[in-house]
Image (cartoon, rainbow, N blue to C red):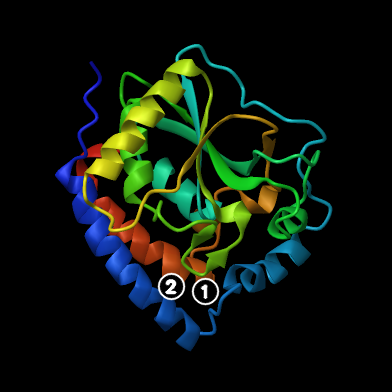
Amino acid sequence: MLNMSFPSSAIFLLLCLFGSCSQGQSGDRDSGMTEGGKDQTLSTTMDQSKGQSPQDSPQSPAQDANLAEATFGNGCFWCTEAVFLALNGVEEVISGYSGGHVKNPAYREVTSGRTGHAEAVRIRFRPELISYAELLEVFWATHDPTTLNRQGNDVGTQYRSVIFYHDEEQERIARISKEAASESGAWKDPIVTEISPLINWYPAEDYHQNYFANNPDQPYCAYLIRPKMEKFRKAFADKLKP
């Protein structure tokens, strides 16, 4: 039987990361990072990237028989992408949109909340180095799964907590993992994470890909993502790339 006990490292990360995350949000306001600050940060980037848009139809990353895939939505995909890229065994992370009803959505459409899509990351990984269950451990530990349609200052259905499973086995593991997380006592409020089949996946515009690495000094990256990454690296040091 699959062992899905919630590890102490993840509980540690939840306690220290989200405690400091709240402090970081008030600090962001002092630095001009108000609610909706992500959209403000994007204005210059979008001007520099005019003409770039998602593909005209749902795209799947290039197939490799040795790689498996997972798709998660847990807030801003800039943060999520940076976290999963750091894990040993993860080969590629693509930021995109999933779970909505509008074909080929642009970022501004998704942020309106009317397309039904969530910001999500498509992860390609080597199961012999990191399992789907271990990816879920990181998923739970690096966002707040108890806040409906919100992660910190990012508000809207596009920021909902969601696991998009690729097959029945992933669904089974995700539901066991969610139950274990709920019973761990790490959160005082109920977990509201959605578990749904992967549908209508579209990669995001080019300027969203590898955003933290390409824009480390952007206010959103400097004040929110960098501190989160530092705590993540400490708590999951044994799972990071060499």
Which SS class for mark 1?
helix
The location of residue 157, given as percent across then percent down, is 61, 54
- Camera sees residue 88: no
The residue under the point 55% across, 80% down is: 34
The residue under the point 50% across, 11% down is: 65
| Numbered tag placed on residue 219 in the rendering | 1
The residue under the point 69% across, 59% down is: 111
- Camera sees residue 6: yes
Which SS class for mark 2?
helix
Q: Is residue 110 left or right of residue 25?
A: right
The location of residue 85, given as percent across then percent down, is 43, 42
> In the current view of this chain or complex, which residue is farthest to the top?
65
Circles 1, 2 touching at the beta carbon (< 8 Å): yes
Q: Name the foreground residue: 175 vs 220.
A: 175
Question: For mark 2, what is the residue?
Answer: 223
Residue 61 quadrant: top right
Count of numbered circles on the image: 2
Binning the other alpha carbons within 10 Å of mark 1 as few (below 14), some (14 to 19) or many (20 upward) gives some
The residue under the point 31% across, 36% down is: 179
Q: Quadrant of the N terminus?
A: top left
> In the current view of this chain or complex, which residue is farthest to the front?
190
Q: Is residue 13 left or right of residue 178?
A: left
